[in-house]
Image (spheres, rainbow, N blue to C red):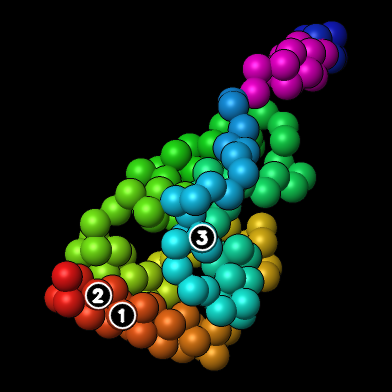
Amino acid sequence: MRKIVRLLGIIFVLSFIVLQFFQPEKNKEEITANHIFKQEQVPDKIKTTLAEACLDCHSNNTRYTWYHFMPVSLMVNKHVIEGKDELNFSDWGNMDVFEKITILEEMCQETERSTMPLKSYRVIHPKAKLKNNEIADLCDWTSKLAEELLAKAISK
């Protein structure tokens, strides 16, 4: 019995090591002209909030910390793919104005309801847990930007 447990342990460790050679592609890209930071006037405190709580999953540039090992990297990659399918701040310049306004409204609602950032993300990234004043600042900014975008669209 002892030999079987030892053999299973060795097989598990070797499998874990072999898996490390098969990592998903990293989500790393420089900020381009279509990124929200290049397209809009974003105050520094909002940039910080977005960077800490949103951009890892909702842009083309994820900050990878300790989770470079399998199978955790697969789970992170899945979250990033799903997050970018919902919203990708790196593609902000390619969106139409009404899509942007809808996204801005949803950003405020999701943070107020604490559905974003995801709880699993907040556990790993304590800075992503938004305080009430950060949520209020984000909602003020999204509301103001939505109004500006709408005014520009109407004036065209």
Residue 122 rendering spot, x and y as whole percentages: 59, 64
Q: Residues under labels 3 and 2: Cα distance?
A: 17 Å
Image quadrant where residue 97 sits: bottom left
Residue 152 visible (yes or no): yes
Q: Secondary structure at mark 1?
A: helix
Q: Secondary structure at mark 3?
A: helix
Identify the image quadrant of the C terminus.
bottom left
Q: Residue at x 41, y 87 (%)?
A: 140
Up/down of 52 relative to 91, above or below: below
Residue at label 2? 152
Label placed on residue 38: 3
Q: Residues under labels 1 and 3: Cα distance?
A: 16 Å
Q: What residue type is disc 1 on?
A: Glu
In screen coordinates, is 37 left or right of 123? left
Label placed on residue 35: none
Residue 137 rendering spot, x and y as whole percentages: 49, 87
Mark 1 or mark 3: name the one nearer the start of the chain. Answer: 3
- Magenta segment, principal secondary structure? helix
Tell me whether circle 1 and circle 2 mark residues in contact (CB < 8 Å).
Answer: yes
In screen coordinates, is 18 left or right of 99? right
Q: Is residue 13 magenta?
A: yes
Up/down of 131 relative to 41, above or below: below
What is the span of residues highlighted in magenta in the rendered image? 9-23
